[in-house]
Amino acid sequence: MFTGIIEELGTVKSLSVYSEAAQLTINAKRIMSDVRLGDSIAVNGICLTVVSFTKEEFVVDVMPETLRKTNLKDLKVGHSVNLERAMMLGGRLGGHLVSGHVDGVGRIESKRQEGNAIVFYIAAPPEALKFIVPKGSVAIDGISLTVAHVGRDSFSVSVVPHTATQTTLGSKLPGDAVNLENDMIGKYVDRLLNSYQDVGKTNINIDFLKANGFLQ
């Protein structure tokens, strides 16, 4: 489990693609202080397992499903990536609960300066957009952000200077792909609603949840 608060920017040292899978080597500093074999590290919001490491780098295996469903396949040697270690119980939850399981790949439509912030407009696939709500949380390349507005096929977020400079988002350009992870509570509610309605065991529906303050 992660929080979406990026700890540092790593650098891709190598990306070896074989068959439909891959192995990724990443240079890092801060997160290497207590890394162990089998640790989970979020790389651009994707939960990956450390299979080997040195004092300055770690290696992860990337399965075919992950390559197909994320933007990892677009990485090149020298690219920066957002890194976050798994959260520790008892620590501060500065962002929101992030599992590191990507729900879809969005694409930056445009970006503009607004005061001290950068506003990003991101096109999202329907399966991801359905769970994105105004003022709700979304993880973009592993970064916990608050949704500003939601449209028919896109949404926007406003990024403060610290986030822009300390993550990869500040250097992203229109047309770039980004990993999207929805808030997990919304996904569980949707699953429960659909399951119960399929077997006709409840009167709980969207109107019921809105009337009782669960949804806006």
Image (cartoon, grey):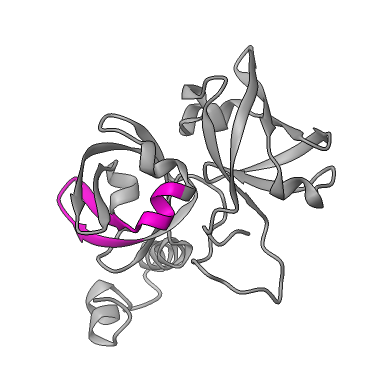
Check the image and report above or below for 197 versus 164. below
Residue 118, percent from left and from top = 26, 51
154 in magenta: yes
Q: Quadrant of residue 62?
A: top right
Q: Which residue is drawn at 67% across and 46% down?
A: 41
Residue 86, percent from left and from top = 68, 56
- Describe residue 151's horizontal placement relative to residue 171 as left or right: left
Residue 129, percent from left and from top = 29, 51
Q: Residue at x 53, y 33 (%)?
A: 80
3 in magenta: no
- Describe residue 127's horizontal placement relative to residue 100 as left or right: left
Q: Residue at x 34, y 48 (%)?
A: 128
In front: 48, or 63? 48
In front: 189, or 78? 78
In the picture as drawn, the residue positioned furthest to the top comes out as 19
- Describe residue 10's horizontal placement relative to residue 61 as left or right: left
Residue 68, percent from left and from top = 49, 27
Quarter of the figure with the C terminus: bottom left
In the picture as drawn, the residue positioned furthest to the left comes out as 152
How many numbered markers are drawn?
0
Check the image and report above or below for 80 versus 84. above
In front: 120, or 17? 120
In front: 173, or 161? 161
Q: Give the range drawn in magenta.
A: 146-165
Q: Which residue is drawn at 28% across and 69% down?
A: 135
